Amino acid sequence: MLVLSLWEPIGDPTKESRDGRLIASTAVSMAMNLRLSEAMVYSKTLRSKQKPNELPSAELMEAIDKARLVCIFLTSTPLTLNLSL
């Protein structure tokens, strides 16, 4: 959503106007509600509490998925922005 807020709508710009700041603030709000800013530390904490031969819990898997989402976003956003210029 954050990347979409930077692009203009497709089609006739006179028919539709949108405020990219609204989409950007929604994306940031969603990320904060999902606690994506804490995902890396939380997954590392859960992983350190896990026993060596124990299967990962659902909570740990969710935390790892959120941390991966943050990593993917941080690596793909600059590339996407560079391609759109």
Image (tube, rainbow, N blue to C red):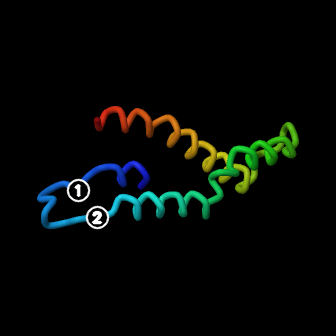
User: With respect to residue 25, does 42 lie above or below?
Assistant: above
* Mark 2 nearby-residue class (10 Å; few <14, some 14–19, many ≥20): few
- Quadrant where the N terminus lies? bottom left
Check residue 64 in the rendering and tell me which mark sits there, or answer none: none
Q: Where is residue 37 in the image (x, y as percent from the top left)?
A: 65, 51
Residue marked by disc 2: 18
Closer to the chain start, of discs 1 and 2, is: 1
- The residue positioned 33% from the left and 63% from the top of the image is 19
- The residue positioned 44% from the left and 40% from the top of the image is 77
Amino acid on which the number 2 mark rests in the picture: Arg
- Determine contact: label 1, label 2, CB under 8 Å: yes
Amino acid on which the number 1 mark rests in the picture: Pro
Residue 77 vs residue 57, the one in the foreground: 77
Q: Is mark 2 on a helix, strand or loop?
A: loop
* Mark 1 nearby-residue class (10 Å; few <14, some 14–19, many ≥20): few
Residue 29 vs residue 47, the one in the foreground: 29
In the drawing, does residue 4 fall left or right of residue 41? Answer: left
Residue marked by disc 1: 9
User: Residue 40 is drawn in which quadrant?
Assistant: top right
Residue 58 vs residue 24, the one in the foreground: 24
In the drawing, does residue 37 fall left or right of residue 51? Answer: left
Q: Position of residue 62 (x, y in %)?
A: 66, 53
Foreground label between 1 and 2: 2
Q: Where is residue 79 in the image (x, y as percent from the top left)?
A: 40, 33
